[in-house]
Every structure is written in structure tokens, then in C-alpha cells.
């Protein structure tokens, strides 16, 4: 299995897209299975000649020459998900920043989520164009065509308070853990905040903050600061205490922090983090 990661080259797209990666497997590659974890991004995955099946928390992609194209939204649930590949694979996956995908869609993001892994077809020419892009052999040309396509769909997106909330959840080190306090600070009720998160992000504010905190610990570890003890890491990443961090890790990864980091595999300079089945 070969994974290549690309950052958007277009300055407009950099506002909305975190990264794009290609994943390819040859016909004789052995099956791969890895555990992926909840995150704050909206993810679109596009495959050619694969068939996707979902069984509990396991998503399996199997080579299927009769299936020209599959594309779906990946809305990670609150728990980790196993992804398994069997046979040849040609895939592009796009990570949209929080709120980013809303700048391209005709409807709210929640409109497109009818199932846990909903098939995604937001535009009349989407299926045709995605199939054409996946046929391109050279990755750099493929990504350029993909960027051009999404630029053609850009509509922009404005919201009276969600950008402010997201910024606080991502960057405010003094932010209270009480989401009701955050809502009051910007002059709305918690019910209103929850409603707009559900429409445009498809997560609750509490889940979003929980994932941000978890990802901050992962980033700290990958920056080679993991010699700190768990109590120090918990404090610096704004957990109540070490037991709080361990509880969150187990709910998001199925492992304690110590075991999780001993098993974690990082690809593309830490941009992609999966736990492979041994």
C-alpha cells in the first residue's frame, strides 16, 4: 500500500481544505487493516473499482471491477473505526477543515448524512468528474484536476458565530470546559450552538472539544515531547487530570495513552496517523 499526502496549492482552497491524500494498492498486495480515530475534519473518500461494506465498526473495501466509482462521506463516530483493504485500490481522500466543506455545498452538511457512511453525490457532474480524475496516472496531475474541480464549485460560506466558536475551541488555552459558558460568552444559548453544530459540522461542541484535546496530545507526542509524564501532558493539554486523559483515550482509540503510542504508526511526517493490525 502506498500513501502520498498533498497540501492544497491554490491559496483559496487552503482556507477550506487541510490536505488530500492518494492511496494505491497493487493487485498482489496483501490485505491491510488499520484503526483510524475520530477527528475534527469532514472527509470525502473516492474509490474506483472498489465495493465498500460496513459491519459494525469495520469498513471493508474490496476490489470489484464492475464498480466504476464509489464516493462517500466519512463521518467518524465517537469511537475508532477499522478500515480494511482487500485487493487493488485507487483512492483519493480529501480532509476538509471544520466548516470548510460548507463553502461548496448547496445544502447544509447534515443534509448529506443519511447513513453512517453515506454515498456522496453533491453535484450533477460529480460522479463523472471524479471517475475521470481517478483515471489520471500521475498523482500531481490528478491533484491539480481535483483542485480545479472543487474551485469551480466554490460558493463561500458565512456564519454569524460558528467561525468564532471553532477558533476558540481550537486555540483558546483559557477556554472553560463548560460549553454553556462558551455559548453565553458569544451571546447564544447552548441549544442554539448545538443546533448549528449539528447542521454544519455534524458533531456536538463537546465531542469537537474532546477530539481537539486528544489530537493535541498526539501532536505533542509526535513532536518528540513524549518524555514528559502523563500528568504533565494532561495538564498542558487542558485535561482535568491524568485519569480524565486516559478515559478519553480509551473512548477514542480503545487504548490507554501509553499503549496507544506504542502501537501508533505515522505516515507523511505525522500528517496521517493510523494503528495497523499486527
Image (cartoon, helix red, strand yellow):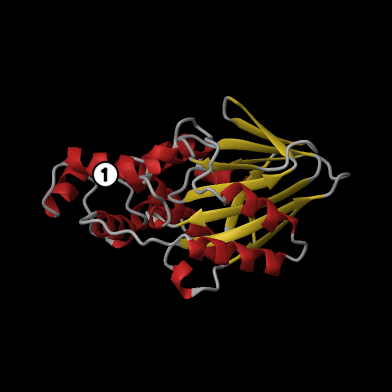
Tell me where residue 4 appears, x and y as whole percent.
68, 61
Tell me where residue 86 appears, x and y as whole percent.
77, 37
Residue that lies at the very extreme toward the top in this rendered image = 56
Q: Is residue 241 visible?
A: no
For the point 39% across and 51% down, the residue is 212
Tell me where residue 82 appears, x and y as whole percent.
62, 36
For the point 43% across and 57% down, the residue is 97
Residue 137 sits in which quadrant? bottom right
Q: Is residue 68 visible?
A: yes
Residue 78 sits in which quadrant? top left
114 and 246: which is toward the camera: 114
As drawn, is 77 to the left or to the right of 236? Answer: right
As drawn, is 121 to the left or to the right of 30? Answer: left
75 and 132: which is toward the camera: 132
For the point 55% across and 37% down, the residue is 119
The local secondary structure at tag 1 comes to: helix
Tell me where residue 1 appears, x and y as whole percent.
77, 51
Q: Quadrant of the C terminus?
A: top right
18 and 148: which is toward the camera: 148
Count of marks placed on residues? 1
For the point 20% across and 56% down, the residue is 160
As drawn, is 83 to the left or to the right of 49? Answer: left
Q: Which residue is mark 1?
A: 196
Judge the density around disc 1: few (<14), some (14-19), many (≥20) Cα neighbours within 10 Å.
Answer: some
User: Please, is residue 217 above or below residue 9 in the view?
Assistant: above
Residue that lies at the very extreme toward the front in this rendered image = 124
Amino acid at each position: 500500500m502506498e500513501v502520498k499526502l498533498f497540501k492544497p496549492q491554490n491559496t483559496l482552497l487552503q482556507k477550506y481544505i487541510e490536505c488530500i491524500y492518494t492511496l494505491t494498492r497493487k493487485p498482489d498486495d496483501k490485505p491491510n487493516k488499520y484503526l483510524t480515530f475520530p477527528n475534527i475534519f469532514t472527509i470525502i473518500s473516492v474509490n474506483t473499482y472498489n465495493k465498500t461494506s460496513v459491519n459494525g465498526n469495520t469498513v471493508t473495501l474490496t476490489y470489484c471491477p464492475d464498480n466504476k466509482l464509489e464516493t462517500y462521506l466519512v463521518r467518524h463516530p465517537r469511537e475508532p473505526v477499522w478500515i480494511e483493504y482487500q485487493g487493488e485500490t485507487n483512492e483519493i481522500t480529501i480532509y476538509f477543515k471544520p466548516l470548510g466543506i460548507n463553502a461548496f455545498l448547496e445544502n447544509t452538511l447534515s443534509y448529506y448524512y443519511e447513513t453512517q457512511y453515506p454515498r456522496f453525490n453533491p453535484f450533477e457532474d460529480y460522479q463523472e468528474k471524479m471517475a475521470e480524475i481517478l483515471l489520471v496516472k500521475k498523482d500531481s496531475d490528478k491533484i491539480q484536476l481535483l483542485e480545479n474541480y472543487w474551485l469551480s464549485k466554490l460558493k463561500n460560506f458565512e456564519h454569524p458565530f460558528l467561525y468564532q466558536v471553532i477558533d476558540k475551541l481550537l486555540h483558546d488555552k483559557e477556554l472553560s470546559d463548560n460549553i454553556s459558558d462558551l455559548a453565553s460568552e458569544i451571546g447564544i444559548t447552548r441549544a442554539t450552538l448545538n443546533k448549528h453544530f449539528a447542521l454544519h459540522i455534524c458533531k456536538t461542541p463537546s465531542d469537537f472539544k474532546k477530539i481537539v484535546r486528544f489530537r493535541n496530545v498526539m501532536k505533542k507526542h509526535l513532536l518528540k515531547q513524549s518524555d514528559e509524564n502523563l500528568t504533565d501532558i494532561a495538564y498542558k493539554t487542558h485535561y482535568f487530570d491524568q485519569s480524565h486523559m486516559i478515559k478519553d483515550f480509551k473512548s477514542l482509540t480503545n487504548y490507554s495513552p501509553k499503549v496507544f503510542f506504542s502501537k501508533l504508526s505515522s505516515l507523511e511526517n505525522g500528517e496521517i496517523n493510523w494503528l495497523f493490525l499486527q
